[in-house]
Image (cartoon, rainbow, N blue to C red):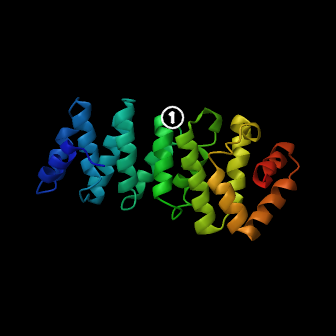
Amino acid sequence: MRSHISILFLELYTKKDGYKKVKELLQEENTVLLQSAVEILSFIELSSLQAKETYTLFRELMKTHNSSLDKTILISSNKIKDKHKVFEKILELYALNENLEIKYSLSKILLFNKTKDLNKRWFQACLFSLVNIKNYDKDLLRNIGFILNNILEEKEEYKIIIEYFKQGIKECQLQDHFPTKEFSFFIKNFSLNHKSTFDKFIQELNSSNEKEVKKLASYFTLN
């Protein structure tokens, strides 16, 4: 949702020379003004040259390590990336950020993007950055459960889900901290409505040489 100040600025800066005026706002030190400028840039048309310049400006702003500004840069970059691919790199960089607020923002971006970019580097970087689940709250865990469900529903794909779980085992012993409650919708939908894929999924878990991977199957076969 756009802030009141961003709506006001958007009216002013989407007109002639809007980009130039927004760039001036990016020189401000006030965080609210900076956030508004970053947000506006995701709504105005950018030429290829302006997009490259905006990318550079965003990278500079990221160095301030301001969590509020970081979230705005992340959200705006997600919107701009569909027209200017270079902004995918910003999402990849934020995938390296361990701040839980950033993790939550990344989870929402993956939810809203559905799975159209599932095979793109940025999407997988963000997905596999969300494996340290024992440190996450219930809202973030629910989002992850819905992301996995989207992958299942739209792609009928289970191998990337297994890979996600394997990464979770490496990062946080997922087999001992599996969020059954928060993943309940995903588990139920998978087992009841995607039986053929579910059977292949369970078979692959059970055929693993790693006992930690085999243990995951128990969370999907409990009544």
Q: Name the residue nearer the viewer: 89 or 217.
A: 217
Quarter of the picture containing the C terminus is: bottom right
Residue found at the far bottom of this picture: 196
- The total number of labels drawn is 1
Residue 19 in percent (x, y) is at: 19, 51
Q: Name the residue nearer the viewer: 17 or 148.
A: 148
Q: Is residue 42 something one can see in this rendering? A: yes
- Badge 1 element: helix
Residue 103 in percent (x, y) is at: 51, 40
Q: Name the residue nearer the viewer: 55 or 38.
A: 38
Residue 173 in percent (x, y) is at: 74, 36
Residue found at the far front of this picture: 223
Q: Is residue 54 above or below residue 171?
A: below
Q: Is residue 94 something one can see in this rendering? A: no
Q: Quadrant of residue 155?
A: bottom right
Q: Is residue 194 above or below residue 65?
A: below
Q: Which residue is mark 1?
A: 100
Q: Is residue 211 left or right of residue 146?
A: right
Q: Is residue 71 above or below residue 29?
A: below
Q: Amino acid at mark 1?
A: Leu
Question: Which residue is painted at 86% across and 46% down in the image?
Answer: 210
